[in-house]
Amino acid sequence: MTKPSLPGNGSDFTVPRVRAWRIFTRNRASVIGITIFGLLLLLSVFGSFLSPYPPEKVGVGQRMEPPKSKFLMGTDELGRDILSRVLQGLRLSFLIGLVSAGVSTLIGILFGAVSGFFGRWIDDLLMRITEIFQVIPRFFLTMMLVAFFGPDLINIVLAIALLSWPQLARLVRAEFLALKSRQFVDAARTAGASTGVLIFLEILPNSLGPLIVNSTLLVGQAVLQEAGLSFLGLGDPTQVSLGVMLYQAQDIMRTAWWATAFPGLFIFLAVLSVNLIGDGLNDLFNPRSRER
Amino acid sequence: MLKKLLGNLGILILVGLMGFDTSTLQGANPQSGGTLIIGLEGEPATATAHLATDTAALMVASNLFNGLIGCDMNFNPTSDLAESWSISSDGLTYTFNMVKNAKWHDGKPVTAEDAEYSFNEIIAKVHPRGDTWWPTVESAKAVDKYTFVIKLKSPYSPLLTILSNILVSGSLVMPKHVYQGTDPRTNPANLSPIGSGPFKFKQWAKGSHIELIRNENYFKKGLPYLDRVIFQVTPDAAGRLMAFEKGELDFLHWYIVPHEQVARLRKDPRFKIVEKGGESSATNELLLFNHRSPYLKDQRVRQAIAYALDRNDIQNKCLFAEGKVAKSHINSGVSGFYTDKFDYKRDIKKANQLLDAAGYPMGPDGKRFVLRDFWSTGRPYESRASEIIRDQLKAVGIEVKIESFDRLTFVDRVFKKWDFDMAHQLFTTGPDPMISVTPRYHTNQIKKVAFTNGMGYSNPEVDRLFDTEYKVTDMEKRRQMWIKIQEILMRDLPALPLFEIPIVNAVSAKFNDVITRPYGYIQSREEAYLVK
Amino acid sequence: MPSPLWGEGAGERHDGCLYMPWIQNRYFRYILSRFLQAIPLIFVILVINFFLIHASPGDPVDILVGLTDADPKVLQELRREFGLDQSLLVQLGIYMKKLIQFDLGYSMRYRQAVFDLILSRLPATLLLMGVALALASFLGIFLGVLAAQRPYGWIDNTSTFMALAGYSMPLFWLGQILLLIFALKLDLLPAQGMVSLRAPSEGWGRVFDIMKHLILPAVTYSSYFLALVFRMTRVKMQEVLAQDFILTAHAKGVSGRQVVYKHALRNAMIPIVTIIGYNFGFMIAGSVLTETVFAWPGLGRLMFDAIMARDYPVLLGIFFIISIIVILVNAMTDIVYVIIDPRVVYD
């Protein structure tokens, strides 16, 4: 099903791919971003094969050994290989980021689309709800949810996701409000398209631009939030996530700097790469680079 | 002849030298002055000891108030507000003669009436652990201005130990004229106390620090030496350690000393690792077994776990070899009662045999059954212990699922909902095991209250011993009864003792005598002084 | 002493009240209307949080006795004292009733009036936030302007990278690394706390002392905003610099620097103000991490402790006060927006 490429469409998702790629790569930063992201993705996917040791095995080496050829990133206080744990943690952090952003996006699209399309009292209700989220400090609520319902990985992902969708919903709503009275929608409606088709197959694809940008940024934010929760002791200590590694490294960081440097570095690289990609996408979809 | 004389002289000199405390040589005359800054891991709720038993509150309160008695490193009672005391021959009447020159920080004199009010109206009514010992008291009265008498219903050996230990009894004497007619829970004096102690309350900057200054009119002549004692709230372990190394903090108590740093700090001349001050608490880390679990209710399974675990390895990795394996439900520091006769030696074969005999054969995948292991956040060694245990129990086919919770949720799951299989928990076992050990294993302690018998363990034989031993006044007889209790507990294993928490306090080398008591981590710092 | 009731405009009656002359100020009225609109919002927030907190496992009285095996009578008394033994709806009703009388309740954990407690911790957080925001704004704007003038030059590239770094790093990790380097290894700055406890100072000495303690936390905290402000300034400046009226000013002979700073900056300020204004809520939340790492005695840490202790009066109180502050800041941001850019019109 081809997407209409009408003038004055506002969103630029219909830009032919080659032109899009060129715009994207003109920004040096986003090229770097994609490269780093790609590398990290490869590492995390093939991590279990690349790991020299099982990440949870206690005592593969002496406690708190500095980086050397046998343990490229050193060992932690239980003698576990940090490189293996970082690879597993990277995978988990990506998972957390992608799932949180994904769930947020889905909920955001649903609410935003319904609100923007139908308007009136549904719209009012949604706006009130998102206002609540705007006023409450997000992180406090996340802390409360995780503290109360248990620092389980699932709870953490859900809590982060549940508190991130409002900003996406507002975005989608704004796009829908702008697009729903356009010609191509009327055209589709007269052609007999049902409401569902109108929402999901006509308007939505044209509003994806800013949505994708924000979703990408959400991935980075989710990873950072999980790290923050773990630092406060609200992470899931039974999992090997980069945030939990940072938390466990606190006690020994004074003498074993590698235990905190490497996990932190990888969180940084992961979030940085995602942000750079988001930047590039931003240049692509919003030529005026309007930021919220 | 001359040789023998010289020899004897030599021996005398040697003995004399050995008797010298080197710290006395260093700062032979403690000078006045200095500020001791103590790091706290959390902010206390009040600066008193009557409402809560958390370490932070006790650390502050012990400097502001006095008890009737304290005790020395050999657990002999020492005088505090009571300069002397006597026990009647039937063991029912304790008479305390109070000092006559003690004054409250607002100038009024401290009398036996304050003691009477404190015990009857405050401690008996609001202290969380009052019900452990107060029911044995028939009356506690001031018979004249400086004489305070406690009459018991029946002989109770641990009484003096309890009175000397604020962790157990919170028994600090509080000013009647400040608390009379008010609710001891909400009286604003809880936040800016008026006590009789070596230091006076100066200010409490919420979230930041509590400052105390020297009480110039302290009834113990010459004390305290320090000008000020300040308690700083430092919730982050890494930041706290850095502050200590920079000299911003002078004292980290044993529950917050990071064990992997101990070896390094010992070697550093700027710091001292003081290995005393926790003997009153005598804390053990235990692995609780829920007797409602279908697997753990079988004694053979519990024993199998005891045989399967290499607790030496656990202690080594969790405490960085600073602690010891716990061989009994009583800590070895409570030397009057402790025995290690009934400990388990690691024996994987025996463990497997017991599990087979209990009816849980090893499956083709090497697994028998699954157990959940809970721990609560805040103690890094518990997290490490659970991971090592999971690793070790694989060898006997027990798969361990680890879950962790914040403190309150943990308490809820383990002690109120009784929804767990194994759980990690610290228990004090001193100063007298009747106070700290009995409440964990007695049948009548199976109630939905935190830190009681959440395991659901019930053995009438040991209950009988618990109910009678504290009435016995003969130390040797009591000891024998406790040996029997330990035998039963180690056989039944309601909980498996894992390791003893090492008594290591980190102090700046600039100060001496910061810790002089078996409850040194929370004691008053009246004897501490700056080394010049 | 002139009473506020009889101010300058007292004699003139407009459509405002005689007794409160400032009510005629349209900005004040705008803010007031925003508050009134927000009342149902705040109510909903409080109710949701109330039930959320009470749905959680964990009994606050356990923390109150210091996490020890306690006499059940004592526990029961405590529950009674704090009204915890009554049904949820009754508790909610009591709370709301007190709230209307501006009584935020009594903290179970700290045994103090919630309002006093919050007030005692708020200044530290505001100080930290204020300094961090000021740092982020000035540095961000300064670097953004420079970077916009020479795109892809070395200032631009370095600043962009540093800004992105600040945006992508875990806040507490950055803080701990800064502590390791500057407080421990180089021994230049203090490690914990807001003031020097061993040698307290008065007057200006105290101000410098606090400033010294503020450096590392503020730098850590500002990293996120530095990125945002820098990037926003850079983009806006680039847009504005390319516009016609700049060329016109140049042609008229106005000096280069004047052109840039006077005309262009003013136009760039709007989004910056909105960033700061609308992200205020985030900043309050992010303070938890910074305050924990540096033992800064602020509101964020109080929030965390209250969550851990299930101290619901404090939690609800903090939500209440923060909601009010956020609404206030949002309203003021909108006003500043209008003042800076007269083209913006509100309905």
Image (cartoon, rainbow, N blue to C red):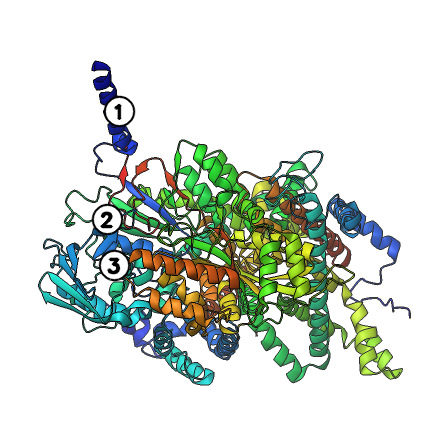
Mark 3 secondary-structure assignment: helix
Determine which residue is flagged by label 3. Answer: B160
Which residue in the structure is indicated by mark 2? B213
Categorize mark 3 by other alpha carbons within 10 Å: few (<14), some (14-19), many (20+).
some
Query: In which chain is the residue bearing label 1?
Result: B
Subunit that carries the residue with mark 3? B
Question: What is the distance, in whole Å, between disc 3 and disc 2 at their CAs?
Answer: 30 Å
Q: Are dots 1 and 2 in contact, CB under 8 Å?
A: no
Percent of width and height locating residue B346: 59, 50
Q: Earlier in the sequence, mark 3 or mark 2?
A: 3
Residue pictured at 55% horizontal, 47% vertical: B312
The residue shown at (46%, 85%) is C89
Marked residue chain, label 2: B
Asked which quadrant contains residue C270, the reply is: bottom right
Circle 2 Cα neighbour tier, 10 Å, few/some/many (<14 / 14–19 / ≥20):
many
Secondary structure beneath label 2: strand
What amino acid does circle 1 point to? Answer: Ile
**Quadrant assignment for the N terminus of chain B:** top left
